[in-house]
Structures are given as structure tokens and as C-alpha cells.
Image: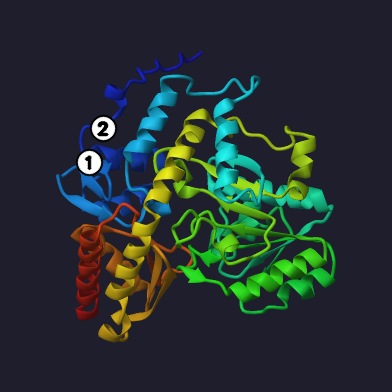
Amino acid sequence: MTAAPAAGPATAASTAPATATGVFDQLRRHLSPKLALTGSFAGRGAVEESAGGCRVTLSDGRSALDFGSYAVTLLGHRHPAVVAAVRRQLDTMPTSTRSLANPVAAGAAACLAGYLGDALPKVYFGLNGADVVEVAVKLARLATGRARVLAVRGGFHGKSLGALALTHSPLYRVGLRGCAVDVVHLDPEDPDAVLREASAGDVAAVVFEPVQGENGAVPLSAEVLRQWCEDAHRHGAFAIADEIQCGLRRCGERSVALADGLPVDAVLLGKPLGGGVVPLSALLCSERMYAPLAADPFLHSATFGGHPLSCAALPAALAAIEELAGHGAELSRLLDLALDGLGQRYPGVVTEVRGRGLLRGIDFATPRAAGAVVVELAGAGLLVSPCLGRPTTVRLLPPLVGTGAEIAEATGILDAAIAATAAG
């Protein structure tokens, strides 16, 4: 019998690579060669090393403005109030027994429900956005006894199998024969779409993003969404607003759906909910929708759901977001001014600029042009978010902690990158 190889010591000193080259080697060997390739392009051979506020420091000493990070860093990196709250909990009780009552999760749930005016009093905590999409769909189907769910063309709701069924782009389903949920994708400009589908029967819920993020910062019509919600309710179905990317003041409001007066049964939050320090997502919903989980709290559970470190971050994050809300409105105004006329300056390259608040999308004529701009931006010190499901679009996601000078710096880099792409 061949002896098992001796295990090496799992210490930071033995596993952390000393150089950027070592990082890329480990990425290729243990994660994905494509991650190594894209990371090398973005950092021009350097890797991320530390961060604070809007800026990331690379291993070669350069710094970059972070207007990307999957929309997580709304409060920038290492916001001091959030870090302090997490550190206090780390020194007290960093995990939960799952048998005894968890006061940190209970307090966070009350805080979050109150933040949205107690309109949706029930809360479920996850870690990633897809976690709460999954539980929302599950509860809607159980509460109604129906199978079908309506989603929207261009929508993105995650990549886990149930959430993936709601995500519109077929790019994410390559190689999969089917998904676990029966979903119909609606035309976002058709106000009668929900009525037509619900009249045919068996609809449990309609799920939508008030501002589609992955589709390139596309705001949906509040009038259409209001009609959808009302038609869903007339036929006994739920209306669910996925605000994982656009909520929490990213687009100016605590909840875009509630601010627009939409009669939703649930709002999904995530990304910056943990203050950009720890992972956290949440479903807030009505008593009726939550009823199956109220009757059996173990109907849907997760080992790290309601984790004390994440839940400790929530009150600090919400307080910081509210302190900066007015400043965010001013940053949005500055973005409007800076991006105005971009298409006129670069005809044939930039085809559209749109968005709401601190979620902006810039459409380019071709995927090649969009990719070239992203590479130019990263090299010049500005990190942004490409749209995987819409490869002609680049997203700008500036944090609330940014300054007017940083908005000017970022848009100056953007202008130069587009000019270089146009010239090439």
C-alpha cells in the first residue's frame, strides 16, 4: 500500500505567495488560469495588496480608484465604524451556536426592518445575493402553492441553480439542460405582461430589479412595475424587488421600489449591507409571504445565516450610509455633469450613457471597444465593473465616501481611456 503524502503545515507563512508572480501561479494551479490572466491584465502584473476608502494599493506601489468591486464597496474599503463593530463582535463571540438564541441577528433584523419603515417586518439573512433570491422564490412558491415565477428580460439574480433560472442571459446557462424553477421572462416595456401570464394561472411571483445592474444600469419604468405589482396581487401572486445592487442609497433611495411607491411584498438587499467588510444579504418581506418559514424556521436554513460578524456590521453600515446620503446625491449630480455629452464627444464609440444615482452604465459600439476601455482604465488607475451579460457595457460604481475631486479624477481617466480607444 502506498503511503499517503505528508501534509504540509497550513500556515500563512507557508501558503501566502511572496510575490505577484507567485499569486498568479497559485491562481492558475488551484483556481482558474483565466482568473490569473484577467487579473494580470487588470493589474499589469501586480495584485491587490491593501485598501482604504476609495483607493486600492497594488503590490508594485501604484494605487487605483475603486469604482467597481461588484458594487460591494458603497462605503469604500475598511470604513472605520464598520471595522470597529466587526472587531468588537470578533472579540466577543464571532460565531453562533445555532442552538441558543442569537441576539446579534435579532438586533440586526429589527434594525433593518426599521430602516425600511417596518413596511416589510420579516427578515431572512444570507451571505450572497443568490441566497436570498433562492429563499424568496421558495417562500413564494410554498405560500401560494404555485410553481411558475415571472422574471424580466435583462435581469440578473445570481448563478446558483434556482436563482440562475431567473437570470435572463443564456450565457450563464451554457452546458446546463435546465434549471430548477419554471420561469417566464417578461418584456420590461410591456405593462400587461404580468396580467397575461397570471391570467393563465399558476404564477407564484414576479421578480424584478428596479434598476438592472448587470444589464448595464438600466432603470425600469416605475409605471410598468406598479402595474405588474397590482396585477400580481389581483391574481394572488407576490411582487419581489431585487435591490441587491441598486438599494441602500446606491441609486439614491433606501429602497428604490418603496420610494417609487411600488406595492411590493419583498425587497432583497445585499452587496454593501455588510459595510464592504463582511458578506451579508437579506430578504425583507410581508407576514403572508414569510408564513411558511414562520411555521417552520428550519424549512430553509444555512450554517452561516445570521452570522454574528456580518450582523454586527449591519447597524454600523446603515448608520454610515445614512450619514453620507446627502453627499451621495451631490456625487450623483457631479457624475451627471461629468458624463454629459460623452456620446457627442466620441460618436461611433460611446452609444449611450444611463443609470441612476451612483450606478451608471456606458454603452460602447462593440464588445472590443468596451474591453479596450476597461484595460486602459485599470492601467491608468481606475477600476470599474464590466457587464458579463452585456459585454458592450461598462459600469461605474463610485462609493459614497468619494469626493468631488475623486469623481473628477475618475471621469478624467475615463475620458482619456475612451479617447485612446477611439484613436486606436
For the residues bearing labels 1 and 2, Cβ distance under 8 angstroms: yes
Relative to 387, does residue 60 appear above or below in the rendering?
above
Secondary structure at numbered mark 1: helix
Rendering coords of residue 394 (x, y %): 37, 67
Residue at numbered disc 1: 21
Q: Residues within 10 Å of mark 1 (few under 14, many from 20)?
A: some
In space, the residues marked 1 and 2 are separated at their CA atoms by: 8 Å
Relative to 33, does residue 228 appear above or below in the rendering?
below
Q: Is residue 306 left or right of residue 34?
A: right
Rendering coords of residue 100 (x, y %): 64, 19
Q: Residue at x 67, y 60 (%)?
A: 264
Res. 276 image quadrant? top left
Q: Judge by depth and name the residue closer to the eye, 257 or 392.
A: 257
Quarter of the image containing the C terminus?
bottom left
Residue 397 is at least partly visible in this image: no
Question: Which amino acid type is shown beneath numbered disc 1?
Answer: Thr
Rendering coords of residue 256 (x, y %): 54, 62
Residue at numbered disc 2: 17
Res. 403 image quadrant? bottom left
Q: Judge by depth and name the residue closer to the eye, 420 or 266.
A: 266
Relative to 96, does residue 58 appear above or below in the rendering?
below
Q: Residue at x 59, y 60 (%)?
A: 258
- Residue 261 disc label: none
Secondary structure at numbered mark 2: loop
Res. 197 image quadrant? bottom right
